[in-house]
Each structure stands twice: as structure tokens, then as C-alpha cells.
Amino acid sequence: MTKPPVVRISRLLSALLLAFGLSACASLSSAPTAPSHASEPAADATPEPDGDEIPADKLPNQPLTSELLMRFLVGDIALQRNQPQLAAQTWHDLVLKTNDPRVARRATEVAIGSGQLAIARDDAQRWIDAVPDSIAARQVMLSLLIRANRLDEAKPHMQALLAAQPQEIAPFFLQMHMLWDKNTDREAALRLTEELTTPYPQLAEARFARAVALANVGRLDDSLKELDEANRLKPDWEPAILYRAQLMGKSSTPQARIDYLQSAERRVPKSMALRSVLAREYVEASQFAAALKVYDQMLVLQPNNLEALMGSGLVALQMRDLDTAEQRLSRATELAPQQTGNLRYYLGQIAEERYRFPEARDWYQGVDGEFKPAADKRLVRVLARLGDTDGALALLKTLPAETDEARVANLQLTASVWREARQYRKGYDVLGEGLKRYPGNADLIYDRSLFADLLGDYAESEAELRRYLALEPDSVMGQNALGYTLANRSTLADTARLAESEKLLNAAIVKEPDNPTILDSLGWLRFRQGKPAEARALLEKAYAKMPDPEIGTHLGEVLWQLGDKRAAQKLFDAARLLDPQSEILREAVQRLGAQ
């Protein structure tokens, strides 16, 4: 169902939602012997409306005979012995014998707790018959009717509740949609909503309730008309603005929603909710700079706004602004450690990319929930990079391997462990065994090409990359890898190979124009073509986006040739600081005679 954003829950709605959960709250093993209130909330829940004590004149003059006492005991003993059906039936019989509203209330609790909802409805009705003014009884009955999808029978109970609590009418209509779930009869929900809201034509919240109900049966034009009326009654009313933007998602372009929200935000400049939705729309439209600007504005007003910290951090990460991403995401985890477990995964990525492997290990080890499998995979590589080969292999054995895809991924991880341990032959052999089991697997072929290169078999490395691209001709990763390989293994005289390299890299950069690894490859190609000035511009752009040791080494070599040896040495030093074991750096420094 189409549901608008949730705002603060009204007391009436809270009580109804609590009543929905009675089956989970009513204990079958330790129920008290005295009747207790059927809608008694948890200690931290919204308190039940006052004034629901059963008046003395509503209590029957019923003596407590030995027979009744025995039946009470049977009902409670059945609960204690985990015989819920017997307990519900026994308490139901007691209602029939006593007509006591206290017994009816207790019987309703027991029937709900045991899942006997038909009996619960009968008991709740007898509770209402005995005490028509009982708010709690109406709340429980209403929840039972909604759960049973008997909405046509719910009207009198809802009317009674609204009449008893007129201060709750507006907030209840604003959030009425929260009572329905995916199994609710949408047409019945619309009928009930229209009947309940008819007496309140000048109430914006009533119009809003109709708009939601109409949208849920696909009548979007009528829904928008109700929202127009709500905005006439309450100009620039935030809930109506936000819900209209949500409905626009079904029939408009992302830019149309952005334009609408921008206009609304100018009229309601202090609305954090509007800014939050606008920022998310920018993200959906891949307008990341605009999204980050909105999040920044939110943080100026509320520096500890969790959504803005998380949203801006993830957007900054997408934009490769690692400083901002790290600062915002770290702050979010500090403010709400229990709600931000997934952010540790991204913080681990940032630390890993900056070659802070002990820190990356700590972040990945702290990930739980849905991101834990992905974090564990990255943790394998980090442990290997830290020299803990045994730990990496031990963790790898715990990873799921129930599908061919998972088993191939684990083979790739195993090879990466041996790569970090500089046991290239072992990694190559792991991939070779994998290709025997999964012949023609493109991922294994690609990885084996890298190991062939590490082993000095450049002809096989190139052949495997060509084999990979034959299987995945549109792969940016493959185009970049073969393009770089051809450039790196060619001289100015190898015009055909350099031309092929340029063709591959141009195809890749068109698809991902801001990818720093492709920019690096293009820069290196220009250098090999004898165009150091063009190479410098491309490599500086790549290094600004990703200050990786390999990119820094390439840029340093270009600057060295251009005569700026001091700047080149600074880049070599920075690369060595990040990755002291970099083979590309070591080879370049030795060849150039640098330090």
C-alpha cells in the first residue's frame, strides 16, 4: 500500500497499534490470576487513555461460588501448563456464566494470547455490551476487526473512540493509514475512511486520510484533489507536500519531483523533512553535489542530525570525497552505535583505500547484520594484507559456499590471500583448479591474467585478458586492464598496440568518465606515446580523485621526466608511506635513480 511518511504517533493510534500486539504481550505461562487490563502497554509505551475504570454499577451481583472458583483455577492452570485452547475456552465459559466485564476483559486477553481470535471477538463484544463507554474495550475490538479484515464492522467502534477523544480526531486521521497492512481490503479501507471523515470536510487531516485511501486503490487523480483541498485548508502543510511528492513518483520524472520539492522548500525553509526528501531525490537522480549541499544545510541547523550525517557521508563517498565521508560517517556511528552498524562497512572501505589496514580490520570486525557477509569478504583481504595469512584463510573457510557464484568468489578470495603473501604461483594454481571446475568463468579468467602478469608471463596475461573480453565485451574493467597492459608493455614503435590501447581506454572512459583508474591508464598511455604534458594533466586529475600509490608513482615518473624531480620525489615518498611494499614504486625508483 502507498503510505506517506510517518510522523509522531497519536495516543489513540498508539493504543490501537498496541492492541494489535496483544498476542505477543499476553503471557501464556505466567498470567496473573486476577483479571488485568487488555490493553495495558509496556512501560515505555504511550499510556492508555484515562477514565477506563469499570464503574461499580456495571458489575453484576455475582457470588463467587466454589464452582466458579474452580473454573477460574482451571483457566489459569491451563495457561501455566501451556494449554492455551483450554484456557481460552474456560475463560469464555466464565464470561457466559458471569456477565462480568472484568472476566470478559481477562477472557479477551487470554483468547488473543492463545490465537483464538474468533472467541476473542465474542468476549470483547460482551465486554463492550457490559461497559459501552470502555475505551479499552473498543480499542481491542477494533484491532481484532481490522486484523480479521472486517472493516465494515469497525465503523461504530471507531466512531465511539473518536467521540470519546475529540482531541485525537485530527492526529488520528493523519495517521489512519498505519492501521492497514498488505492484507487489508483496500476498497473496504476507503469506504471506512470516507464514512469516518465525511463529518469533517474542513479538517485538513481528514482530507489527507482520504488522499491516502484513494491512492491505495489507484485513484491518483482523486487523491491529488484531496491533497489540494488539504493544502487549501492548511497552506504549505508539510504532510500534504511530502505525500504529493511521493505520489509524483508514480507518474513524473525525477526532475519534476525535484522542482516541486525545491519550490516547496523555498516556501517552508525550516522544514527538515522537506530537505531530507529533497536530498534523497537528488541522490536518486545522481545529482550528488546538489544532495550534499542540502545535507550540509541541514547540518548547519542541526549538527547532530543522524539522517543528514549518514546521507551526506554516503554521498561524499560516492563523490570520492573521502575526508567528508569519513568525518560524517564516524560521527554518525558515535551518535547512534546501535543504529549504524552498516556504516562500519563503509568506514572500513575508506580506511582500506587509505592503506590504514589495522583500522579497516577493526571496522570490518564490527559490522553486523546484512552487511556482515560483504564485510567478512573484505576482511579476508585486509588480514592477508596485514600478513595474517592463516587468519585470512581461516575466516575464508567460514564464508558461505552454497552456490557456484559463492564458490567462485571464495576461489578468488583464496587467490588474493596468496597474492598478498607474494606466493603468486599458489594463487595462479588456485585459479587454474577453479577453471577446471568452472571452465569459461570470466571472473576466474580475469584474475588469472593478473597472476600471469605477476609471474612475468606477459603473453599469457594478455591472452587471458583477450579471452575475458571475448566473454564480457562491454566490461569497463576488462577494457581498462587490457588497455593499460598494452600501453605498459609497448614502446613508441608499437603503434598498432598503442592504437588498440587507446581504443579500449576511450571506450572505457566514455562509460565512466570520472573513474580514476581509467584516467590513470589514459595518462600512462599518453606518457608511453611521448605526450608527457597530456599525461601529467590526466594523472593529476586521477591522483586528486584517488591518491593511490600506483597513480602517484605514475605521476611521479612523468614529473621526473618533465624535470620537476622535487615534486616527483614527494610523490614517491607519499606512495612509499602508504604502501612500502609497492613493486611498481620500487621498480620505478630503481630505474629512475630516485630515492
Image (cartoon, rainbow, N blue to C red):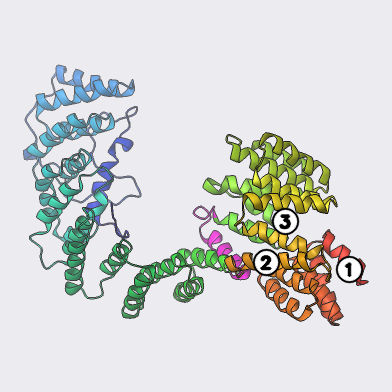
Q: Residue at x 77, y 64 (%)?
A: 497
Residue 24, horizontal then vertical, whole percent: 33, 36
Residue 490, horizontal then vertical, whole percent: 82, 65
Which region of the structure is painted magenta? 320-342
For this orientation, the residue located farthest to the front is: 496
**Which residue position is annotated with label 2?**
503
Say which label, 3 or 1, has the lower sequence index.
Answer: 3
Q: In the image, is residue 275 part of the stretch drawn in magenta?
A: no
Question: As shown in the figure, which amino acid type bears the numbered disc 1?
Answer: Val
Residue 487, horizontal then vertical, whole percent: 77, 65
9 on left or right of 56:
right
Q: CA distance from mark 3 to mark 1?
A: 24 Å
* Nearest the eye: 293 or 69: 293
469 on left or right of 420:
left
Q: CA distance from mark 2 to mark 1?
A: 30 Å
Label 2 packing within 10 angstroms: few (<14), some (14-19), many (20+): few
**Which residue position is annotated with label 3?**
357
Report the disc number at residue 589: 1
Question: As shown in the figure, which amino acid type bears the numbered disc 2?
Answer: Lys
Residue 111, horizontal then vertical, whole percent: 23, 30
Report the disc number at residue 432: none
Question: As shown in the figure, which amino acid type bears the numbered disc 3?
Answer: Phe
Q: Is disc 3 in contact with disc 2, using a CB cutoff of under 8 Å?
A: no
Q: Residue at x 33, y 63 (%)?
A: 249
